[in-house]
Image: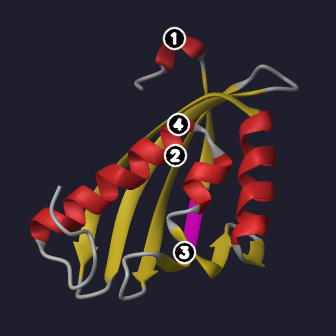
Amino acid sequence: MKNLKPPFNQETAKAKVQAAEDAWNSKNPETVSMAYTVNSDWRNRDQFFIGRPSIVDFLSNKWEKEKHYKLKKHLWSYTDNRISVRFEYEWQDSETDQWYRTHGNEHWEFDKEGKMAIRDMSANDIKIEESERKL
């Protein structure tokens, strides 16, 4: 694959989004964390944290709770070193077995090496029946 470092063009922005989708669907917190800078600054809904160890902790807890997690990301827009995506994912709550579809947006900013320095995410969870799953 071509260089996935800024400045982005249509092709590299789409490839960066697909690489992120693939990594998150691996559900491997350590692997996912390596796409971010050492001091990556995150907002995930109402949680704010900084750094790879916090990312690993967050994702470990997330995927312990969210069984059968499956994500789809869509490129929304990009500039030289920023990408915005729309996403949806489906998951089953490990405590209640309730299925959900989560819809949201992310705004990403990258350093010159292509590591994500800022991740800002907003999302909403919608209860669904297992028969309503799309992903």
Q: Which mark is residue 107?
A: none
**Is residue 62 toward the left or the right of residue 69 in the image?**
right
Q: CA distance from mark 4 to mark 3?
A: 19 Å
Q: CA distance from mark 1 to mark 4?
A: 24 Å
Q: Where is residue 124 shown, x and y percent of the image? A: 60, 53
**Secondary structure of residue under mark 2:** helix
**Secondary structure of residue under mark 3:** strand
Q: Where is residue 50 shown, x and y percent of the image? A: 73, 79
- Residue drawn at (45%, 75%), measured in percent from left and top? 115
Residue that carries the numbered disc 3 in the rendered image: 119
Q: CA distance from mark 3 to mark 1?
A: 32 Å
Which label sits in the foreground, 1 or 4?
4
Q: CA distance from mark 2 to mark 4?
A: 5 Å
Magenta-colored span: 119-123
Residue that carries the numbered disc 4 in the rendered image: 26
Task: Decide which of 30, 103 is in the foreground and name it.
Answer: 30
**Disc with the residue nearer the chain's start (4 vs 3):** 4
